[in-house]
Amino acid sequence: MSVFLLGSEPEKFLQKLEGVIPGWLYRFVQHSDDSIAFTYISPQIELLHEVTAAAVLADAEILLKQIHPDDQILQRQALAHSRATLEPLCLEWRIITPSGKLKWLRTKSQPEKLANQDTAWFGVVLDITSEKQTEQQLIESNHHLQQSEQKFRLAFENANVGMCMVDLEGHLIKVNDKMGKIFGYSRQELEAMTVNDLAVPEDKQVSPTFIQHAITEHQDHATLEKRYIHRQGHIIYGEVSTSLVRGINGEPLYFISHVKDISKRVKYEQEITKSRDEIRQINQELEERVKLRTKEVYEQQQLLRLYFDQSIIGLAIVSTDKTWINVNPRLCQIVGYSPEELRIKTWAEITHPDDLDLDLNNYQRLLDGEIDGYEIDKRYIHKDGHNIYVNLGVQAHRRLDGSLDFCVVMVQDIGDRKAMERSTSLALQREKELNQLRSEFITAISHQFRTPLTTISCAASIMGKFEAKLTDEKRVQYIESILRGAKQIDELIGDIITINLNQEEIEPVLVKGSLIDFCQDIIDKTEYLSYPYKINFCACLSSKTRLAVKFDPVLLKPVLTHLLANGIKYSPTILTIDLLLLESPEEIIFEIQDYGIGIPETELEKIFEPFQRGSNVGHIAGIGIGLTIARKLITFYGGRIEIKSELGQGTTVSLVIPKQL
């Protein structure tokens, strides 16, 4: 079958026509048995389909196989409808060429019913790929414009600083709610005022001067401090960061300003330092301008970039998977990372582990649509490792179907505030602990003094009333009771004085003597005062050590006395304890073993601190200074105390001093 079916002159005309059409001409036939064939195809088909006309005339299925899978049903339905109604076939579809290119095609052809009941179409196929790409670019451009508008509006309305737009005469064109809270006016009232209606008389020239300089001398940005009058009459100190917005041709349009109430900070600086009269300025101009197709897109993006980059708080756009899409310089300054470093991290990675659950729970509620924003105090981990306390504000931006598109994040450094809170809390806790310790000490020491005083009082009272009736033996017993009580009081006073001794106040005085006799003397007195308790004593010493060693009996005696008394006191059911005297080449070791209640393992480190007692002592009397005194005195001696204990089994205390022969 020939490609060209017409006579010579029509054929030449057709060839000329084919050369100027961005497509190819065809005659297509669908037989009554539904088989298909092309009876004419212009050579230009090869430019679109990358196949020859002859190949398609031989096998029409070649073109059908190139149709995009998603468009095949639509193509078959349109062909069937045109065949049934003989209406023109008008259709757009996509093909994938043998080289992998995706192209958009459009056809318009006229069907006719042939005598043999076949249907033929005469038409043209045009390449509309460029047209479709232009349409897609226009759709994307419009979507980008809508996003820019939404981001700016969201940032403007939800900023936690005052924001306003001011015309070239100083009129407030638009303000956010935060601006109204700062000055005490409603948004409608502020939008009917000028910047000078709010300023104190002395500062009324600040804004007009800047406006004039910005217009005539191209000073497009400034950060300044002004004083304002609140609606209630008091003065507000404000920090204003303002920028001039110019049109695409450079003509001045209006100003956008960030206003932060710094009254508390100024008052603090005036009262505490009286020398801090300047604040750091944020002076970063937007140098790269985005080229957009329309003037409105250009202005909206410039406004958003000026606010974002020059904000005095940290700002960021984050995605639904917690990654940073965009961050401003202030946020980078707060966390110590560059924008490039943050973009490869998630905000969860730099959040303190103890604060992560709170943030994640709120973020999940935001993802689920329960809330549109939240505000919390949390900690970030700075790049150099230290923690930064911040106030975090998160606001959702949702798609039309309600799903989360991205979030606007506002971060303010509150480290100074948190440090002051921690300092105050620690001071209060310490004061509470000292008061509790003081109360416990007074109660305990009062009880310790009351026991011997009661003994003295009773003995003296009996002797006073019944002196004539008392035998000499009874009189001696009461006098010994009085002396014993007085000695206990004297020892208590000595213990309290010992706690306050400094290292330079005590120096050991060594004398030669028998450690065995020294220990036996202490045992006899302790058993006398603690009847019916018994102390089993065993000395494992060399003959040379037994004869005489140098030691300080004055320092050593109260230490052993306290340790033996503790062993007896905390053995309420077993009436014996052991004292073992040992030696090593360099040291003398005293081991006191009791079989009492023991000390919890977690409390062994604290047991040597003043007024610290085991949590299991119950009603056993004591003030918790025996071990404190023992360790302090033995430290003066140059020795040490070691303690081992097991709950319910008993305690072993080892007293170690240097051996000096």
Image (cartoon, helix red, strand yellow):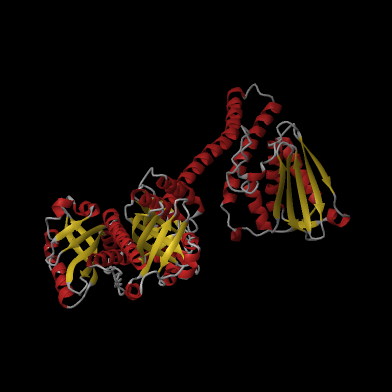
Residue 371, given in percent of the width and then of the height, sits at 37, 44
Count of residue discs: 0
Vertical position of residue 328 compared to residue 428: above or below: below
409 or 299: nearer the viewer: 299
Residue 281 occupies quadrant:
bottom left
Q: Taking 93 as reference, is 181 left or right?
A: left
Residue 152, given in percent of the width and then of the height, sits at 28, 59
Q: Taking 652 as reference, is 436 left or right?
A: left
Residue 497, given in percent of the width and then of the height, sits at 57, 49
Q: Quadrant of the C terminus?
A: bottom right
168 or 27: nearer the viewer: 27
Vertical position of residue 654 compared to residue 128: above or below: above
Residue 506 occupies quadrant:
bottom right
Q: Taking 99 as reference, is 533 left or right?
A: right
The answer, for residue 412, to whether it is visible in the render is: no
Residue 647, given in percent of the width and then of the height, sits at 70, 38
Q: Farthest bottom residue?
A: 217
Q: Farthest top residue?
A: 469
510 or 66: nearer the viewer: 66
95 or 567: nearer the viewer: 95
The answer, for residue 172, to whether it is visible in the render is: yes
